[in-house]
Image (tube, rainbow, N blue to C red):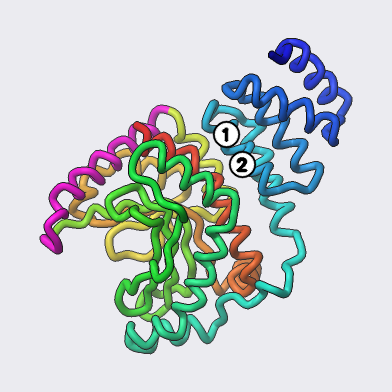
Amino acid sequence: MPDIVALEQRAVELARQGNFGTDALTVNVELANAAPRNHGVWTRLARCHIELGQFDEAIAALGTALELNSANSIARNLQADVTRRRAARPVTSAAASGFTPQDFYALGRLAPTDAMAIVGPKVETLLLSLNEQRMAKRIVEARGRVGPGAAKLFHRNSYHSGGAGHIYAYQHGGRWEPQFNLGVFSENPWRVNAMRVGLGFNLSSGPRDGERSEGQEQIAESFERFQSALSLAWRGHLVEWMSASAGFIQYGERGPSTDLLPKAAVEWLINCRNSAGLGWVFVGRWLFMDKPDDAQTIGEMGRLVADIDDTFAALFPLWVATTSG
C-alpha cells in the first residue's frame, strides 16, 4: 500500500518548486489512485496535465476536483485557463469544415425536412466527433452508475427538427433526464444565427405517448434537484462560468435571454416555479454568428468540438449533482 503521507509531502514540495512536469505527474497520479477523494490532488494533477499540453486529461481532472469541492476556486481558475489554451490550439485540416453562413440561411428559409437534409449531416459529424472526446466517455460512465447505460453519448441519427429554423440533439436516453443538449438556430424565426450547448430540461406537457406522465414526473423531480443543487452549492460556480463563457438561459419558445446577466439568470433558475408551464428550460453556452470569434469557432469543426467538450466539462459536476440527487 502506498505511503499517502509521503506522497502528499512530495507532491506539495514539487508544487512549491513550480515543478508540474513528468515527475509531479507521476506522483499525483499515484496519489489520486490512493486518495481519490482529495480534491487538492486532482487540482495539482490537472495543473500537471495543463503544463504538459494534455488538455483533455486536465479537463477531466478539474471536473473531478469540482465534483469533490464546488468551492475550489483554484480548480475553477484552471478550468478557464485550459479553455483558453485549448481554443488557441491549431485545428487539424481533417475536421476543419464546420457550419457556414449558408447553413444558417438554409436552416431558416427551407422547409424543416429540406433543412435537415442539408444541415443534418454536419450535426451528425459533430455528434460522432463528440463521442470520441474524454468528457463524453465520462458522462456515459456516470450515467451508467445511476440508471440504464449506453455505449455512446450520442447515437446515429439522434438529431431532430425543432420546427422552422431549429435543429437540436440530446444525449442518448435523455428525453426525461437532465440533458446534455445542443441546438442550431436560424435568425428566421429565432432572430439569431447561433448554436447552444449546455443542460436542458424537457418539462413540456401534452399526451404525446404512453410514457409521458411518468416521464414528466421524473423530469420535474430532476429540475427540483437541479434548483436545490444550485441554491446550496453551485450558484457561485455557475455565475462565474456563465460570466466567462457567454452563458445564457433559455426557456419556453423564446430565444436566449441575453438581457439577463449571469447572477440574475441563475436566480431565475433557482426561483422558477412554473417550469411545467414553460415546457423547456436551458442553461449553457451560446455561440453567435455575428460575433467574429464565435463565427470562427462555429466554422471549424475541430475547434467547435473542443469548445463543446469544455462546456460539458464545466457543467458536468452540476449535472452529476442533479442526476445523483
* Residues shaded magenta: 207-232
Q: 3 and 245: which one is in front? A: 3
Near mark 2 (Cα within 10 A), the count class, few <14, some 14-19 or many ≥20, is many
Of the numbered discs in the image, which one, if any, rests on residue 64? 1
Quadrant in which the C terminus appears: top left
Q: Secondary structure at mark 2?
A: helix
Q: Main secondary structure of the magenta part?
A: helix
Q: Is residue 309 left or right of residue 56?
A: left
> Does the magenta-highlighted stretch encompass residue 276?
no
- The amino acid type found where label 2 is placed reads Ala
Count of numbered badges drawn on the protein? 2
Name the residue located 52 percent from the left edge and 65 percent from the top edge.
128
Residue 228 in magenta? yes
Give the camera-side residue of 76 and 125. 125
Mark 1 and mark 2 residues within 8 Å of each other at the beta carbon = yes
Q: Residue furthest front?
A: 1
Horizontal relation, residue 295 to residue 84: left or right: left
